[in-house]
Image (spheres, helix red, strand yellow):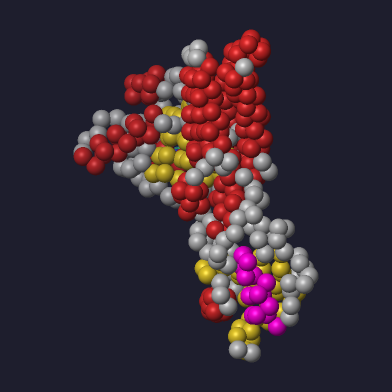
Amino acid sequence: MNEFFDTVFAPSTAIGGAIAIIRVSGEQTRAIADAILDKTVTDRPNRMRHVRILRSGETVDDCMAVFFARPNSYTGEDMLELHCHGGMQTVRNVLSVLSEAGGVPAAAGEFTKRAFLNGKMDLSEAEAVMDVINAQAESSLRSALEQLSGSVSRRISAVQERLLDARAAIEAAIDYPDEAGESAYASLPATLDETAAALHTMIEEGRKARVLRDGLKLVILGRPNVGKSSLLNALLGEDRAIVTAAAGTTRDVLDERLSIGGVPVRLVDTAGVREASDEAERIGVDRAKQAMESADVILLVLDGSMPKTPEDETLLSQTAGRTRIVIANKCDLGSCIDDTLPLSCRTGQGVDTLKERIAALAQPSLQSTAAITNERHIRALEAAYDSILHAETQTDPDCIATDLSEALHCLGTITGTDVDAELVDRIFANFCVGK
Ligand code: GDP
């Protein structure tokens, strides 16, 4: 158990709700609870009690309070939760009562950081807490909850165990070359191959599943006036982009986030891809080309009411190798293009089918909710992978042992068994106050 000097407090709910939950954690929690409440709650942990918060005998708030005795609390320390009235002034008053009683305001992420340092959760689980809070679509939430339940830690520790066995065998071979040497070396190449393959799979899966966190990036392409802005609006269900009958009016690249069939999607509407006639439009066209490069899925819009133009043909061949959906818009005016998804932004026909197709394209990455998606974790996996590949090129047992130690260190930074205080501080600084 880590001993923290301060007993900290912070509101854990957003300002402005009907109820504000204020949390207190640390050594002095019992003393503070006994000092500020009209009844004792510390003798009956985990039970809510109706109490009054007092300051020099006067009622500051009439609220509910619950005490959690260490180590059975979120942080692993003694904790008090006050469920107060949610008004700004009430919260301010309660915070100042806590301050007068000896508490200090908690830093960002302080409760979760204490939970990690007290061994209540490992680092990957602590980081998942943030992802759960920030999840903007059902699929991201499922992935974060999975990680919160220790899925990352379990996969990492399976690899760690193999590497530890391999390193122990090599060390035995170094120390007692005659006895252990042969057998340790016989199994080493296979062990290294298997671990490298396991890490590689995790990295690949993670990269794909990052879609869950960052959103599937959709780019809308098409020559001017085919209805790209109208399509963006149809998908968003509101008039966000400017739609006019003059060609080349969408000057900028708009970036919108939405959830389609439970999949987080980033929608980018681009300036018409064609030679730009003025400076502002040229910048828009350049950005459109960049957006197209980084897209996961391209929505190529054609005007279905007329035959394909040479510009359409160029866009079709430029996007041929990419994941794309070709849409024939304006089908309310009659359709003359085959092998496309007929759609009308005007009547809404085909919009639901388009949404279903988009959601279906994201399905492969949705399947593995246990994938490791955090960028920091993926970088650590890559570093571990590199160390193992390096070990495979070595013949000297000492060098191999060093590479394996390095790989183990990298994996330890994911779960937090091998991190320095500075990294821990940096990670929790991204949390919100009260978490
Ligand atoms: P963009 O330049 O590709 O972004 O095209 P816009 O979305 O600005 O649309 C160009 C013109 O086509 C506007 O006058 C729209 O009202 C019209 N338009 C867009 N979609 C449809 C559609 O499905 N049917 C019909 N009839 N007109 C459409």
Q: Quarter of the image for the C terminus: give it.
A: bottom right
- 321 within the magenta span: no
Query: x, y percentage for residue 357?
Result: 58, 31
Residue shown at 41%/27% (left/top)? Answer: 306
212 lies left or right of 326:
right
Residue shown at 34%/31% (left/top)? Answer: 289
Query: x, y percentage for residue 153?
Result: 64, 37
Splitting the image into 4 quarters, where does residue 373 fall?
Answer: top right
**Extreme-left residue of the structure:** 278
Query: x, y percentage for residue 347?
Result: 53, 42
Seen from the viewer's position, the closer of residues 290 and 273 is: 290
Q: Is residue 288 visible?
A: yes
Residue shown at 58%/78% (left/top)? Answer: 101
Query: x, y percentage for residue 404?
Result: 54, 25
Seen from the viewer's position, the closer of residues 435 and 265 is: 435
Q: Quarter of the image for the N terminus: give it.
A: bottom right
What residue span does the magenta drawing correspond to? Answer: 24-38
Q: Quadrant of ligand 1?
A: top left
Seen from the viewer's position, the closer of residues 63 and 317 is: 63
